[in-house]
């Protein structure tokens, strides 16, 4: 009974408490007192310019970097930097890195994907099944027999996502997953991310695409020079003109357009603000 | 190297069990080296060409070009074996040059010929392996042979990253050339040096990023991956066994004759 109560109480997937990190040889802090509480099962977008600390924050969340100050808690338990507990943390929190070529170490797609799950100590047969399942699920089958150096950027990205999914993480971190993809693969990757979030996974994603973040996310974290500038719902964050300007971001197109249309009286104040251009189109035509 | 890599991914024999192909290539190579008869070498040569080109579907012209590379080396090295500079003329040929002769003996000519056909046949064995078996499969076989893990992991990483290295190098060179970096000999040298140092810096950075990414996937010092195996076929094993027995017979016969 008591156990259940504890379970119920902890609905934070990742918490950071005043964490700061400075890279060796740098004077400026990459992270400067970041405190965040990220709810389980949420889709959370991280925005901010290059060097705002997104990637550093992600590496702290999976124990690759140990913040010099502050604490990180995963699933309620504070991160300890022993080998055993780090392995546990890294199983729970998976990172898909921005550059697939920095992540894929094997020339064989199948071997590449099998790496993570074998590290968890799973026996070969179940590992093989799991790898096959992920290959099937992400549509990697048509190019699974090609060497990594013959894959396109989008295909490499799919493999790097499969790399992590095979480990069944509870929290999936995606560092600019759509960067430098062609429109076809961007759409594909985004639809996969959409499916994953429906399965209850907590997804943290760094992105520069305001329109996408606004439509996709449940929460947006705005980072600037290693500090949290704003954390809230997309509407709150994108509506905060001051914070957006400081982060060098513009409000989402649909938000700006909606405001104009509202002001000119083209559409009446509805029950809800549209999140995508398609929503807005429907409102205007309907 | 890249040509061979591309071709072997297209080979129709790619999905044949890798251990079979490996054993075939190594055994045939051993027989070919051990045997003294020209016939063995000829058989090995033609069977390998047949398997690689006809069965594997490697274009014949490509294969011929690849064979020319070792052939050129052979020509140069056997010439050195055959041609002597001596005061006395030998029995095969002799060209007088002042008081000396550019000359060779019949036995050395025969020896050189034997070396040539043996070496060419041996090369076709290796070409068979490298034109039908992809690197990751060969590594799987080496793992089965209990080659130390560190060696295999290194080979795996080198094979993966050599392509990235070349890609990066060629991208840097292209961008240098588009800024007239190859205007004359001096600038060429300087830009080559610049490319080298940029490559080193990028490689170091990349290796750090790769290590982070592997750690993020619970890496603990050993690169564990699942081997991808194709089932061995009885018919193929029987063929290989029969063929090698014939070769062995020919090799033994060439010695006792």
Image: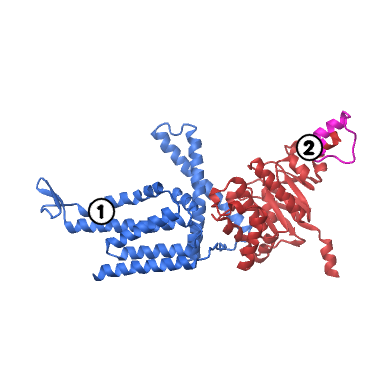
**Chain letter of disc 2 in the image:** A
Query: Which chain comes out blue in the rendered image?
Result: B
Residue B120 sits in quarter: bottom left
Report the magenta residues as a range: A253-281
Answer whether residue A51 is visible to the viewer in this image.
no
Question: In the displayed structure, does residue B1 sit left or right of residue A10?
Answer: left
Quarter of the picture holding the N terminus of chain A:
bottom right
Question: Where does residue A161 sit, x and y in percent of width and height?
Answer: 65, 53
Q: Residue furthest top?
A: A264
How many numbered markers are drawn?
A: 2
Quickly name the residue at label 2. Answer: A277
Closer to us: A27 or B124: B124
The answer to whether B148 is drawn above or below residue A285 in the figure is below
Image vertical order of residue A235 relative to residue A36, above or below:
above
Q: Position of residue B39 (x, y in %)?
A: 29, 61
Name the residue tied to disc 1: B78
Task: Indicate whether residue A264 is drawn in magenta.
Answer: yes
Tint of chain A? red
Crowd around label 1: few <14 · some 14–19 · many ≥20 (10 Å): some
A2 lies left or right of A139: right
Residue A48 position in % (x across, y down): 71, 42
- Compared to residue B110, the image places residue A30 above or below, namely above
User: Residue A121 lies in magenta, yes or no?
Assistant: no
Q: Secondary structure under badge 2?
A: helix
């Amino acid at each position: 009974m008591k156990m259940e109560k504890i379970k119920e109480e902890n609905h934070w997937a990742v918490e950071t408490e005043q964490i700061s990190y400075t890279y060796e040889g740098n004077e400026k802090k990459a992270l400067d007192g970041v405190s965040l509480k990220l709810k389980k099962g949420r889709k959370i977008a991280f925005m901010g310019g290059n060097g705002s600390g997104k990637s550093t924050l992600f590496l702290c969340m999976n124990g690759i970097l140990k913040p010099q100050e502050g604490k990180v808690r995963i699933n309620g338990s504070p991160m300890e930097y022993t080998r055993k507990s780090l392995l546990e943390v890294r199983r729970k929190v998976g990172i898909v890195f921005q550059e697939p070529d920095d992540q894929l170490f094997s020339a064989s797609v199948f071997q590449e994907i099998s790496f993570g799950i074998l590290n968890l100590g799973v026996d070969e047969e179940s590992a093989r099944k799991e790898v096959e399942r992920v290959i099937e699920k992400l549509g990697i089958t048509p190019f699974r027999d090609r060497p990594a150096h013959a894959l396109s950027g989008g295909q490499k990205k799919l493999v790097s996502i499969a790399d992590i999914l095979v480990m069944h993480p509870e929290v999936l971190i995606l560092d600019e997953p759509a960067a430098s993809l062609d429109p076809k693969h961007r759409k594909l990757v985004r639809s996969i991310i959409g499916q994953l979030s429906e399965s209850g996974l907590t997804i943290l994603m760094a992105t520069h695409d305001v329109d996408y973040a606004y439509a996709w996310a449940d929460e947006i974290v705005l980072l600037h020079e290693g500090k949290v500038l704003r954390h809230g719902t997309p509407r709150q964050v994108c509506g905060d003109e001051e914070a957006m300007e400081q982060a060098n971001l513009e409000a989402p197109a649909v938000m700006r357009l909606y405001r104009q249309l509202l002001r000119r009286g083209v559409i009446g104040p509805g029950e809800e603000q549209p999140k995508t251009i398609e929503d807005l189109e429907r409102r205007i035509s309907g | 190297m890249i040509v061979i890599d591309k071709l072997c991914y297209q080979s129709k024999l790619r999905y044949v069990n890798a251990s079979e192909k490996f054993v075939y290539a190594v055994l045939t190579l051993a027989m070919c080296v051990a045997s003294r008869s020209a016939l063995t070498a000829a058989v090995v040569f033609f069977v390998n060409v047949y398997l690689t080109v006809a069965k594997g579907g490697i274009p014949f012209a490509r294969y011929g070009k690849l064979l020319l590379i070792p052939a050129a080396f052979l020509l140069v090295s056997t010439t050195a074996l055959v041609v002597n500079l001596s005061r006395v003329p030998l029995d095969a040929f002799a060209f007088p040059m002042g008081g000396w002769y550019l000359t060779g003996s019949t036995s050395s000519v025969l020896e050189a010929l034997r070396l040539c056909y043996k070496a060419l046949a041996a090369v076709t064995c290796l070409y068979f392996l490298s034109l039908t078996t992809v690197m990751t499969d060969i590594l799987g076989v080496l793992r089965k042979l209990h080659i130390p893990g560190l060696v295999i992991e290194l080979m795996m990483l080198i094979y993966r990253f050599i392509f990235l290295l070349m890609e990066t190098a060629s991208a840097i060179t292209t961008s240098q050339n588009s800024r007239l970096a190859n205007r004359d000999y001096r600038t060429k040298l300087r830009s080559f040096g610049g490319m080298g140092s940029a490559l080193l810096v990028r490689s170091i950075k990349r290796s750090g990023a790769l290590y982070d990414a592997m750690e993020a996937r619970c890496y603990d010092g050993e690169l564990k991956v699942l081997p991808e195996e194709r089932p061995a076929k009885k018919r193929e094993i029987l063929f290989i066994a029969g063929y090698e027995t014939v070769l062995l017979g020919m090799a033994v016969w060439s010695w006792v004759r």
